[in-house]
Image: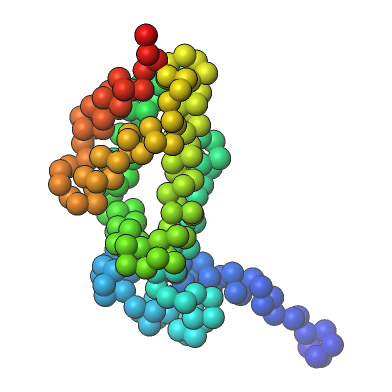
Amino acid sequence: MSPATAKTPDVSRRSERSRKAILRASMELVGDVGYPKLTIEAIAARAGVGKQTIYRWWPSKAAVLLDAFTEVVHDDDYQGGLPDTGDIEADLKTVLRATADEFSDAAFEAPYRALAVASAADAALAEQFVARLQEPGLEVYVRRLRAGQEAGQIDPGLDLGLAVEMLLGPFQQRWLTRSGPLTHEFTDRLVEMALRSFAPRG
């Protein structure tokens, strides 16, 4: 084959394959060895790339992991929002039960906990963590509570952002500090107590 007819390598496709391999490797490794032992060198070796390839795209292992985890959780769930069957209590119980199961799954729990802990010591990472993971997740709850207001199930004067923090705060605290199990009984009681305080007055 002459130089004139040789096929030009698709650099963008090769770069995308490398990027996906790096993100996949970071998720696998943080589950295998934990965040403290996770290194750029180990990610590069698992992904089959040079570490300079990683540093060309990301400044740190936390940044790699944030991108990897964001891709995992940012699926159609955020765009579709929470279920709305007309029964807000049942809908929130269904979602929080599923969330408890997810947060109890090591494949999900390890990278999310690693990012939460790393963010506490890194203001720039914390800003990205909140903007890319926490805020989109909270917004779907706000939208569901707003639908509840429109249906007359939630007090019309309720601060929805604060209400969502009240609903999810105990869940996050229990998970982060490992102060108790994330059982369905716990999440059901959390929804019931929150909705009693969110109910229309009078």
Residue 106: x and y in percent read 27, 54
- The correct choice, above or below, for 46 with respect to 160 in the image is below
Residue found 30% across the figure and 20% down from its top: 196
Res 68 visible: no
- The correct choice, above or below, for 179 with respect to 199 in the image is below
Res 97 visible: yes
Nearer-the-camera pick, 120 or 46? 120
- The correct choice, above or below, for 30 with respect to 145 in the image is below
Residue found 21% across the figure and 45% down from its top: 174
Which quarter of the image is occupied by the C terminus? top left
Residue found 42% across the figure and 19% down from its top: 155
Residue 107, image quadrant: bottom left
Residue 33: x and y in percent read 25, 70
Q: Residue furthest top?
A: 202
Q: Is residue 42 left or right of residue 85?
A: left
Which quarter of the image is occupied by the N terminus? bottom right
